[in-house]
Amino acid sequence: MKKHNFSAGPCILPQEVFNEASQAILNFNNSGLSIIEISHRSKDFVNVMEEASSLALELLGLEGKGYKALFLQGGASTQFLMAAYNLLQSKAGYINTGSWSSKAIKEAKLFGEVIEIASSKDANFNYIPKGINVPSDLDYIHCTSNNTIFGTQIKDFSFADSAPLVCDMSSDIFSRQLDFSKFSLIYAGAQKNMGPAGTTLVVIKEDILGKVNRQIPSMLDYSIHASKDSMFNTPPVFAVYTSMLTLRWLKKNGGIETIEELNEKKAKLIYSEIDVNPLFKGFAVEEDRSNMNATFTLVNEDLKETFDSMCKEAGMNGVNGHRSVGGYRASMYNAMTIDSVAALVEVMDELERKA
């Protein structure tokens, strides 16, 4: 039976990427070797790294604009401290919109003064703060563009006009069109929209580096990784390769402009059902709803066992909400088809008919 994978991550990838990646596990480029056993210094893999980096910049519209795309390790969680280690000289401003930004704040405080310039903690992070007052003396501003757990997404980044903008885009990278040149540093774990767990994309504007006076350990120094083209140490070969395949798939299918249109259709379909079906209630405020992660709850918890059973029978995977919110979460990353979203909506409709 077909599974509809709504997991928040690691998550769904395009079927053609799975097919090509699985073939490369057995025989990469007709070399007689697996992608996971070739030398990372070989010409074949150097070509993979170069293509992956080039595709990332191309899709983001940042080619030739002074940016470097790196594929590093340690997940976005390591970037919480790397960003501050490399950029925080005196004071940084953080927008706290959920669990991941809270963790980023905790790590950054090890390196300098950190202030929360805005927070939505007062409502369990179900909205994005507005009218943010940004001090003029910040080294950078940090935000999380999409909040996987709470189902909110920043739509307007104009608050960042007065300082370099650092953004954790782990759960919505490559999903929508933005002016990415407004960002000085973007980081994103691969395991949502780009590839398997194991690598993290870091896109950095090179002219923001070298401005702190502390000594940075080599493995945490962006400048060293940039100078070595992500090859300072052995990279996560398979994760980078699969990310490259996914970026190829995205480019072939029209790039970010086309995928954004599909993502908006999927989001409209699920949110329309949440709003019209009296058995469900959305968690995030309407204007800040995420196109990647729709969070919702049952109005009557007595129906939970029935709904859970119906979801299981229909092949729904990963729809349970995070413990911080409860209820349900439908993660609709780039590779999710609209047919899968429609199948979930049908289960929600059926519950209403039965109730």
Image (cartoon, rainbow, N blue to C red):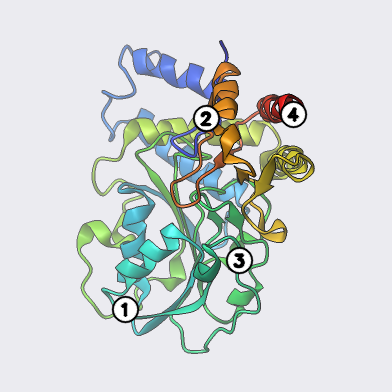
Pick whichever of labels 3 and 4 is earlier in the sequence.
3
Q: Amino acid at mark 1?
A: Val
Which quadrant would the N terminus be assigned to in this image?
top right
The disc label shown at residue 242, or none: none
Say what secondary structure mark 3 lies in: loop
Which marked residue is nearer to the observer: mark 4 or mark 2? 4
Dot 4 surroundings within 10 Å: few (below 14), some, or many (20 or more)? Answer: some
Helix, strand or loop under label 4: helix
The residue under label 4 is which amino acid type? Answer: Asp
| Residue at mark 3 | 128
Q: Which residue, given by chain and number where applicable, does mark 4 sit on?
A: 349
Q: Are marks 1 and 4 in contact (CB under 8 Å)?
A: no
The CA span between labels 4 and 2 is 24 Å
Q: Nearer the viewer, residue 239 or 306?
A: 306
Q: Is residue 90 visible?
A: yes
Label 1 Cα crowd, 10 Å radius (few <14 / some 14-19 / many 20+): some
Image position of 174 (left or right of 208): right
